[in-house]
Structures are given as C-alpha cells and as structure tokens.
Image (spheres, rainbow, N blue to C red):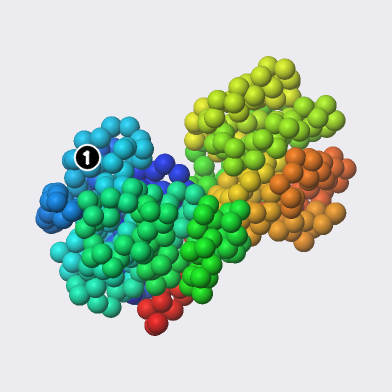
Amino acid sequence: MKIAMLASEGAPYIKSGGLGDVMEALPSALARIPGNEVVLILPYYKKILDNPKYEVEQVSQFYVSLGWRNQYAGVYRLKNRADGVRVYFIDSLYYFGAREGAIYGDIDDGERFAFFSKACLDTLVNLDFIPDVIQCNDWQTALVPTLLKAQYQPLLPDTKCVFTIHNVEYQGWAEGSFFDDVLALPWEWRPTLDMSGCVNMMKGAIETADMVSTVSETYARELMYPYYAHGLDSVLSPAAWKLTGITNGIDVNTFNPETDPALPAHYNADTFREGKAACKAALQKEVGLPQAPDVPLMVMVTRLVGHKGLDLLCHIARQLIWEENAQLLILGTGEARFEQFFRELAEEFPDRVAAKITFNLGLASRIYAGGDIYLMPSKSEPCGLSQMNAMRYGTVPVVHATGGLKDTVPPVDENGENGLGFTFQSYNAHDFLNALKRCLALYHHNPQAFQKLQYVDMCQDFSWDVPAQKYMQMFTKVCAG
C-alpha cells in the first residue's frame, strides 16, 4: 500500500510534543510491513535546514497558490534515512526556513499551514507518488481532506484521506475572511469550514475525511461529549460512524532500561530489583533527597499545566506528606503558579520533596528508572505516553481513568493483581489521594505483590507494532470503501 503521512512535526528532525513522537515511530512501523511504501512530509524549518546531520537533495520546486499569493515551495528529499521511510521537507524561507524560535505561535500560523497543506498535495502530484491513503494530523494539516475533495480530486482520484486527532483542543481557527483571502475555494465549500462565522480547519477535516481517527479508544468515545470535545461534539457526533481510536505505542528502543545511556545501571524484567535499587539511590542523591531504599519515591515528569491534574496534586500534597512515609519528585516547566508551588513545597519539606523546574531528557529517563510510583492524574489525556514509559521502566502508575490512561492502565485489585496500576474515576483530589494511599499500602505492606506488579508492567508490549497493524486495518477498510 502507498501511504503518505503529512504532519507539522516529526522527531528526530523537529518536535514540540507527542505528535513529534508519533511521526517518528509510526511511519517506521508501517514501513516494516511488507508491501508498504511510506512517505513522510514535514516543513523545512530553520532548525532542520541548519542541522548538518541531515543530508538532503532538491527533487522539485513549484509555486503554491494561496488566494492572491503565489508562494515558492521547494521539495527536499532526505538522503540518510535507513528504515525505508522516504522523508521530504517542504522548503519556504518565508514561512519556515528563516524563522527562529518555536515552530508554532506566529500570527500567520493559519496561512503558514494552509501553504504547507497545499504544498504537500502538490508534492505528491509533482513526484508522481499517488498514494492509496493520505494520513494527516491535527489542525496544521486539517485542510488537506477539504483541499483534496475541493481541488485535487481530479489529480488524485482514488486517494483516500484519514484525519487523526491528537488533541481536539487546538482546532485551527481563523477569521471568516480567511476563506476567500487565503484559501479561495469555491463558495460551496464555505459551510464545510464555517463555524460561528469563522473558519475551523478541524471541523472541515472531520466532515470531509474518509475516516477520522484519534489516539486511544476511550478518547474516541469521550469526543462525543461536550466536556471533552471543546465545541466540536456537534460535528463529531454525526461523524461517529467514521471515528475510530487506536492507542499509540512508545519507542521501545529509546525507552529501554537495558540500554538507556542516561541510566547509572541497566536492568530488565528479570533483574529490575537490583537495577532499580541502584537507579533509585543514584536519583535520590542527584536531586538532593535522602538515600532511603525503603521509602517509596513518587515521581512525575510533566508539563506544569492545569489539564495535567496538578491542581489535584497541589490540593493534597501537604496532607500526603504529613500522613504517608514517602518522597515526591517533580520534573517539568510550565505555568508560574505550579512552578512556584512546587519550589515552595520543596523548600518546606527538603527531605521529602524535590522540584526540578527544568527540561532535561536525561533526568527524565533516570526518574522513570529510579521512581517507584508514577503520578498521572490528568484531567484529560488523549493517549499519554509517560504512563507507558514509566511501566517500561518498572514504575507503577497511579492515573485518572480518562482517555488513553484508561486504555493502558487497567486497575489492579486489592492484592495488586489483574491490572497494571491504580486508578481513580472522578476528577477529584481526594479520590486521587485514596488511589495513592492504596498504592502506598501495597508498597509498604505487601512488597512482594508490589514487585510482582512491577514485573508485570515491564513485560507489557507497548511497541508500535500492534498500533501499526491497527492502522493498516483502518487503511485497508477505508480504501475498500
């Protein structure tokens, strides 16, 4: 099958979040399936353009029509990728190559990614790569299915389009004038993109894509409800027939306690007791906590923002410290109120709490390995990767049963069996506290059961092989239709 994957970011070239991780691992997993030809198209950002590691050659150039504009686009093929995925970068100094800083947040983001969406379709035509299916991701490529139906169908008559929602909160809103000024589509397509008098790119994608997917089974069901859908429930509910959820995997080569170069000791499911003990002692020393092997170390690696459930943790933190014999370690940056809270908490309880308000991938790996209990009380979580990373390193998760957290962390019983972690159903601070107390009770009073749970967690297959097969089933179904 010929598959074209279009995204605004993809590791290792450029990454700002989970989409970048998915666009690193999923194309590779699909390319490993015999008979597949996989193309990945990304913007040629300055950070990629300036990186000498990436050997490229120009393979095409053309002009993209955006309303009254004609903007140059160059197409560069990456020469040094060995996994079978063909990577192309869309070059535009005006939109991507000359801009410093973050990849999102410019005032003309709507125009930038409208250009990118059209340039992707032009690239497929110019390179004569006519895909069976195009898979596009989030609002930045949400115009692709609409453009395909409205303008490119004669050139790509049999190509189907799958639109994947990684986070419904960011939908690609633009003023109503954007439709004529930038898109200049036939007027009959205005209702497809119109929402409250504005252009909503994600709405258009949901209505025009042949299939809509999202990143976990539970999140697909949650999107039917206003609480989760951020205003798109009235669009998603009629499209429920073509909405499916496929839970993401993780990069099991990168997140591997046997080989992770950031760890002071390596281990696997059979040797984790000694390995994790060494990692825990080194981690406690690194962050300034007492080296206490029998005191459970609760950890959290996260962006310090509200929807990650930090308000719940803030509400119960002091009670937890007063009532339980445990340590707490937080790594992340984000909202000033949370950064300040955890700094002050660490100053108040220096022997019990450490707060590292920074971004440090090596320390994140050491936290996954050295922690005993991983906290993830997110208010909503389309999929979530950290809970799977933690289990891969033998750190038991305590999570709010929402989205992908519910799919990947089935709850254990009172003996720590028949599940993978501890969960709470209602988004409530004391329900979170009770789940933590159940986990801590197992750690203190039944250490053998806790270690058995760690072993079971480490034995799970969180690789991309299973999700890739589910994507193939979806692609096959949509192409057959």
Residue 23 coordinates in the image, percent (x, y): 40, 54
Residue 65 coordinates in the image, percent (x, y): 16, 55
Q: Is residue 433 left or right of residue 254?
A: right
Q: Which residue is drawn at 22% across and 69% down?
A: 152
Quick one: 270 or 366, which is closer to the camera? 366
Q: Quadrant of residue 412?
A: bottom right
> Does the rendering let one see residue 136?
no
Residue holding disc 1? 97
Most extreme residue toward the front, as rendered? 197
Most extreme residue toward the top, as rendered? 347
Q: In which quarter of the image is the N terminus?
A: bottom left
Quick one: 219 or 391, which is closer to the camera? 219
Q: Residue at x 24, y 41 (%)?
A: 96
Q: Residues within 10 Å of mark 1 (few under 14, many from 20)?
A: some
Q: Quadrant of residue 156?
A: bottom left
Name the residue type under label 1. Gly
Q: Which residue is drawn at 56% across and 36% down?
A: 305
Quick one: 269 or 67, which is closer to the camera? 67
Under circle 1, the secondary element is helix
